[in-house]
Amino acid sequence: AEIIAWGDVAKMGLTEHVMAWSRVDYLVSLGPASARKLLLGLEEPVPWGEGREEKIAALSEAAIRAATGMELDAFDAAWASWVRETYPKK
């Protein structure tokens, strides 16, 4: 939910980009069907104007739910567990 609320990706730093793309990596690891559902859920255009950021956030949350069958908190917990098992420790 926090990442979705960041909004404008141009304002994100390296750490934020890595955190976001790590979640995409996790989604891809769930299989092509999950990645496809996420992309299809995010393809709806959102008009410019008042409330745009909120609409994008709602669309993103719904896309993650459709792709994973999880609410955002459960998705984040599953992602964190996957990271500990998948990424090498430094």
Image: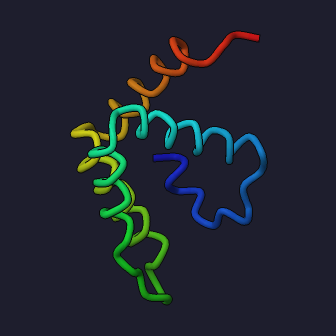
Using residue 84 as the reference point, say whether residue 62 is left or right of it.
left
Q: Which residue is found at the position 49% from the left and 71% from the top?
A: 53
Q: Quadrant of residue 71?
A: top left
Residue shown at 51% from the left, 37% from the top: 25
Above or below for 50 versus 78: below
Residue 6: where, in percent of width, then height? 59, 57
Scheme of image coloration: rainbow
Measured as percent of width and height from the top left, residue 44 is found at 34, 75
Number of numbered tags placed on the structure image: 0
On screen, residue 76 versus residue 34, left or right, reads right
Name the residue: 38% across, 24% down: 78
Viewer-proximal residue, 38 or 51?
38
Position of residue 29 measured from the top left corner of the image (x, y, whole percent): 41, 32
Q: Residue at x 58, y 63 (%)?
A: 7
Q: As displayed, is residue 44 above or below residue 17?
A: below
76 over 60 or under it: above or below:
above
View extreme (front): residue: 32
Using the rendered view, name the quadrant where residue 38 is placed: bottom left
On-image quarter of the C terminus = top right
Q: Is residue 5 left or right of residue 30?
A: right
Residue 72, horizontal then vertical, whole percent: 36, 40
Q: Is residue 83 above or below residue 16?
A: above
